[in-house]
Amino acid sequence: MRVALMATCVNDAMFPETPKAVLRLLRRLGIDVDFPEAQTCCGQPMVNTGYLDEAVPAVRTYVDAFAGYDAIVTPSGSCAGSARHQHTLVARRSGDPALERAVEQTSPRTYELSEFLVDVVGVADVGAYFPHRVTYHPTCHSLRMLGVGDRPYQLLRAVRGLTLVDLPAASECCGFGGTFAMKNADTSVAMGADKARHVRDTSAEVLVAGDNSCLMHIGGLLSRERSGVRVMHLAEILAQTEDEPAVRI
Amino acid sequence: MTARGAVVHWARDAADANRVIVDVARTHAVDEVVKVKSMVTQEIDLNGALADAGIAAWETDLAELIVQLGDDLPSHILVPAIHRNRAEIREIFLRRMHEVGRPAPTELTDEPVVLAAAAREHLREKFLRARMAVSGANFAVADTGTLVVVESEGNGRMCLTLPEVLVSVVGIEKVVPTFAELDSLLRLLPRSSTGERMNPYTSMWTGVTPGDGPQEVHVVLLDNGRTRALADEVGRQALRCIRCSACLNVCPVYERVGGHAYGSVYPGPIGAILNPLLKGTGDPQTDSLPYASSLCGACFEVCPVRIDIPEVLVHLRTQVVDARRDDSVPKPEAVAMRAAGYAFGNARRLRWAERVSGLAGRALTRFGRSRLPGGRAAAGRLPGPGAAWTGARDLPAPPRESFRAWWRRTKGGRVDE
Ligand code: SF4
């Protein structure tokens, strides 16, 4: 099986440790994963703000970069959701039937990390070790757009040493919402502040999620509040083992 | 409807509808009407049109009454006065009831039963006196010409049966083919709106019944943008809405900004799509509504008639953007999106953009010099556009090396760092 890593533009530019963790994790599981260097972005920032024409180049680049792979795995529920549910809209709007056909090929092969591990690789226990108190925030797009269900919980419960504590009102949106976080900053912050409060209520050391964008928002609030809670991507926890505690490749 | 003795009017817009209703009132020389289920009449500002014609309109739903007496606007579809507490309601009753009818008792307390009893006395006088009523309808059944109102107080039934003349204003999207469809909708509505298995009062009326109820019945079938919404292939699903308000109740944005922020009778997620669909783009307030969402999808999850609100929101955002594509001075956002679209067009351009951001990041950290838990450098408060983010949130500084640069340098982690 030819597997490609879709790093996402946010991870590529802001959180490179996350795609590195995905590489380390998948290689440990015996999966050779490629990073097609031609990739850029799923196009979601433009689509969600209403700039469909501006998203066309991103979608075109996506289908070109990932053509020929059996699976495209990405550490982002929201980008996987975009590839699966929005690329068709963009392609249709472009009026290019070839692009539409290409999207039909790549969209269904795009998997969010927890889906890929549980459904495609067929593992819940990835041999990770992380001796900390952790709480999990199911990001909206993982939860509702993709329906990842309890897959992230399955993975976290199998991590040795990890104590998983329930996050109150877990399914409520953190308020990130892409450009929403800037366009409606006050509302976004009000939502995030409640999320941060729930996180603090768990007295977890680490907040984990499958989307660094949401974590950047909640983590930015937790940090401003001097809460001491650290945010980490699911991939970074799953990549750590007793022998190699730090994420380094 | 006509066969059963009702007079049917078509109203293209608010002005048409208001004209019909004012004419009926004038024909009967009434100077007041009682009203129930009045969301659609709020939409067309019937009360304003009646007031201009010297006719007083009395809201009879308890919450609508509170809103009306408080010179206020509804803030929720189902519970229009949810933004008022009982102390405020007591104060409103004491201050206003005597000006418009039976006064509130002087010993009025803010106990809910006492307040309800005062409203009941106040309204009863109006029910018994009014000769004309105006109602909305939850549904209209096509094959029998029946109109349906679902409510929980019984005031609707008083409006529908006591006066001599009844005018029902019905949005054309309310029509269902037969009683079979009505059956499921009548079960869906209370479950999704109040969590009840069945609502306390369901009233149905079909034209005129001699000797029973209003002897003159008018039905105003209202378009007011509904055919425009219907013409929108993605947006038309919003017309399925049964106004259960479930989407409002789960919406984290509505929860924080309240109903008035939406600037219309239909607030919350459904309001954010329905208003632009009915009115079209161009007005700044309406154009802002599709953006009043984080696209979390909670509304779609609860909607009993499966309206994909996030999908329609994105679709309407596209319309807002498209309407301004030819602006001679594009918005800064449009410029940024074009730039992003260009950078994402190929990886080489993106690599370059990331290098610039890495450099900018190093400059940024000088503003804050804070560290995130875990040790990463962060920017504190930034000036300019960055302030929208950093007013309340720290921002991680961009890393020294992007992932793709690392991949190139280490050949995918295969050579030493
Ligand atoms: S959009 Fe759906 S959930 Fe919202 S009020 Fe209408 S029917 Fe209810």
Image (cartoon, rainbow, N blue to C red):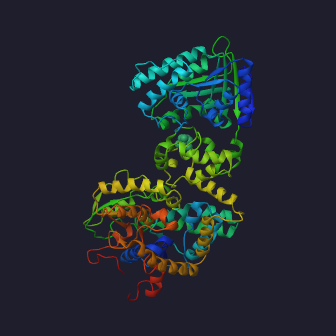
Q: Depth check: give the residue in front, A107 or B125.
A: B125
Q: Could you tell me which residue is drawn at 61 percent across and 66 percent down?
A: B332
Quarter occupied by the C terminus of chain B: bottom left
Residue B217, located in which quarter of the rendered image?
top right
Residue B207, image x and y in percent?
68, 21
Residue A135, image x and y in percent?
32, 59
- How many numbered circles are shown? 0
Residue B132, image x and y in percent?
65, 19
* Relative side of B304 to B406, left or right: right
Ligand 1 picture quarter: top right
Q: Is residue B282 above or below residue B392?
A: above
Q: Could you tell me which residue is drawn at 35 percent across and 59 percent down?
A: A136
Tell me if I can see residue B304 in this picture.
no
Judged from this view, the residue extending furthest toward the top is B211
* Relative side of B224 to B274, left or right: right
Residue B33, located in which quarter of the rendered image?
top right
